[in-house]
Amino acid sequence: MYILATAATENVRLRRTPAARLAIGLLAGTMLGGVPHAAWAQEETTDQAVAAPVVQQDIVTTIAVAGAQRLEPQTILSYIRLRPGQTYTQAVGDQVLKDLYATELFSSANVVNNAGNVVITVVENPVINRIILEGNKRLKNDKIVPEIKLSPRQIFTRSKVRADVARIIELYKRQGRFAATVEPKMVQLSQNRVDVVFEIQEGPKSKVRQINIIGNEQFSDGEVRSEMLTKQARLTSFLSSNTSYDPDRLAFDQQKLRQFYLTQGYADFRVVSAVAELTPDKRDFIITYVVEEGERYKFSDLTVESQLRDFNSESMTSRLPMKTGDWYDAKLVEDTVEQMSELAGTFGYAFAEVQPEFRRNAEDKTMSVNFVLREAPRVYVERIDVNGNTLTQDKVLRREFRLSEGDAFNSLAVRRTAARINSLGFFQENLEINQVQGSAPDRIILEANVQEQATGELQLSAGFSSLESFILAGSIRQRNFRGRGQTVGLSVNYSRFSKSAQVSFSEPYVFDRNISAGADIYRKDFNSFNFRNNERNTTFQQSTTGASMRLGVPLTEYLAAIGSYTFNYDDISLDEASYFSDRDGDGIATCDPLRAGRFLCEAIGKRSSSILGLSLNYDTLDSRLRPTRGETITNTFEFAGLGGSVKYLKMRSRMGKYWPVLGDFIFSVTAEGGWIKGLENNNIPGSDDIRLTDRFFLGEPQIRGFDIRGVGPRVIRLDYIDDDNDPATPNVPESIDAALSGDQRSDDAIGGKAYYLGRAELEIPLGSGARNLGLRPSIFLDVGSLFGVQRPILQDFPNGAQATDANGQLLFIQAGVDEDGDPITTLVTSPTAPDGTPNARSVIPNTFFKEVFVGDTISPRISAGIGVNWNSPFGPFRIDLAYAIKSAVGDDTKLFSFNVGTQF
């Protein structure tokens, strides 16, 4: 008010005109009549003036960049659309900011216009120095880092961090860990660098706590759940990976449920809904299925309508596996369609189609099926194409084909071809031969698209075996030498009880003919052993130098004959200090039967073996490395005597059968047996016509639950001792069983001339995680026996028996005392006691003994147990826990055994 009046008065003073005086008067009246209204109007006018937008439209003269560190100003200006000479508006400034943020190079940006001089101020995003993962134990860095977008030396952006957090969480969800959380953090470094840290809380693996079934009336919840791949988490299912939640498995289980009900005759069955709910603690899932079972149907009319001239409809109808009145089974229908298609394929109808026609009668709940075998031309192989083999020569694959160009198509021959190529081991598994339409309706092209894999093997391993203590092994082998399918190899093995070296070569097709050949050169050193007072003790050493050659010819698709010739030079020796008597006058030491036993003395010496062999092999296995289906039979005959100093006839036979049961379980049954007959009588009383080193031996690992060479005939030396371990008063054991329960002097396995062995084994499938680790558990039952050796001459040296040294002098024990006054016994040839009476106790050095012969019986030994095969990073590993259910007197049983670092 005062301001307005002052301004008006001042204005009057300046002008001093009549009009001015009139204006002053009017102004004064207005002020006196409505002062409040004028004041309000003035405030309103002032506010409107402030709120009105000011549009700044300057012409851009310069554009400057401030704050850039790594980027050049010209580079930053290239990211925006604003150029000098353009009109600057607020919209233009906003577009500049959008362009800069779109590059994801800047954490902040600002644009200021000063009368056409535009200044762009930026703060650059930092550079990532390194990515750090913390807390990840179940998923290692090599599984996460390739999946995320951020990496060292890249520009840090928050959008990429968010995407990487989501990706890591998704990876954990795939592992069944839905409670996993990821917290990203940024550690600021110098020079505008940062370390990005992902702090991971993996959380527990989300299990399936409960599976609810709603709507099932004919089958219990347990029966329905047993058909699903997903299992409820229980204490008994800790080895299974199927207890974790998997959305894909949830969809698969719906198909499993439908398949189960359709095989039971419920043709109208359907899954109404399947819902998986995460528990509030995000630890487990509860899955609920709502099902409608519908009515149960039976088969009624079953017919086959064949439009192919080679198939009679009535004959095929009579051979259908289902019968009228049986409960409807959709799986049986599918199998029948597949079998008919395969049958048509074997007759050359590659494109024959089998279409089942269903007629459902809802009134009497029956289902009639008419299998229509539609007309198709007979097909011939126009061409065979092999693709993907860069190293392997074409002929190596083509010679495995059971079909040639121009042959009538045969589906069985195609499957057999795929199996043979897979068995080579040169290519990735699960090869399929594609069938492509040829140049005419009756022509077909077979395409084998292979993917080669490494066939060279270099193995260096060290391990520990319950059989041979420490083991060192090295080998180099090429299974596809020069791409010709040839195999060359060199191997060296060393352990406490055996050493060997071998060079081998195999040619599967000699001169491109279906004839295989091979040769081996080897040297093997083996130390046999017995047990003395329950301690392992080396007995004889056997060194074998030899070579073998073999030639194989296929007789049929699955049967082959292999002839072989082997020449061995054996040198068998004993430790003279332990088993030889004193040297005679000529300085020659001889093997002492009292120390070694007659069977060992007869085994020593040098001899040669010239052996002719013939094997007949029948093999339909789907894999030679890990068979799951098929059978194999091998019969081997050997004749030693075509030259050399050893003559015998040996026969062996082995049979095995594998098939899947109960889904993914693999059941196998194997049986084998052998027999050897000497062809030369050595005319030595009590001596066998087969030398010790040529006989069969049985024990671990052939029959588990028993020690190595723990089954079969053996000679055991029992001590004559009293309770004070004093030989002066001998105490003959009351029974062999009682003697074997205590310490025994020695236990020598002497082998047998005949044996049999059987095994039943069930391989248990595990989850995908355990399969990736190479774990294959199994339960087994082993049965076998070794027998048939001639009873050796046994020795018995109780009190009073006479024993002599090498010069024929009697041996005596003389009692006395040492320097400390302790009692001692001394072995002498002419003892005299203090009273002049000789102490006439005859003995071999250190003890009196009695030899017994046990174990030569055809009675079966039986063991059962569990075992696990593991393809570990440091070599094959096998562990067995076996219990001997039935054994014979003298057998050496063993509950636990394992082997690491070598194949057995």
Image (tube, rainbow, N blue to C red):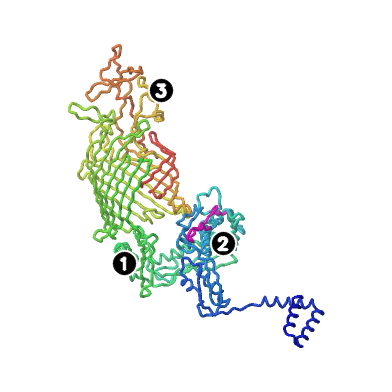
Residue, disc 2: 266
Which segment is the magenta one?
A: 185-208
Q: Amino acid at mark 2?
A: Tyr
Question: What kind of element bears circle 1?
Answer: loop
Q: Amino acid at mark 1?
A: Ser
Residue, disc 3: 723
Residue, disc 1: 404
Question: What kind of element bears circle 2?
Answer: loop
The x, y position of residue 266, in whole percent, is: 56, 62
Report the predominant secondary structure element of the magenta stretch: strand
Question: What kind of element bears circle 3?
Answer: loop
Quadrant of residue 268 within the rendered picture: bottom right
* Crowd band around label 2 with a 10 angstrom C-alpha radius: few (<14), some (14–19), many (20+): many
- C-alpha span from label 1 to label 3: 82 Å
Q: Which of disc 3 and disc 1 is earlier in sequence? A: 1
Query: Does residue 791 show up magenta in the picture?
Result: no
* Image position of 673 with respect to 53: above or below: above
Q: Are marks 2 and 1 in contact (CB under 8 Å)?
A: no
* Image position of 523 with respect to 64: above or below: above
Is residue 262 visible in the rendered structure shown here?
Answer: no
Q: Amino acid at mark 3?
A: Asp
Quadrant of residue 496 within the rendered picture: top left
The x, y position of residue 619, in whole percent, is: 35, 54
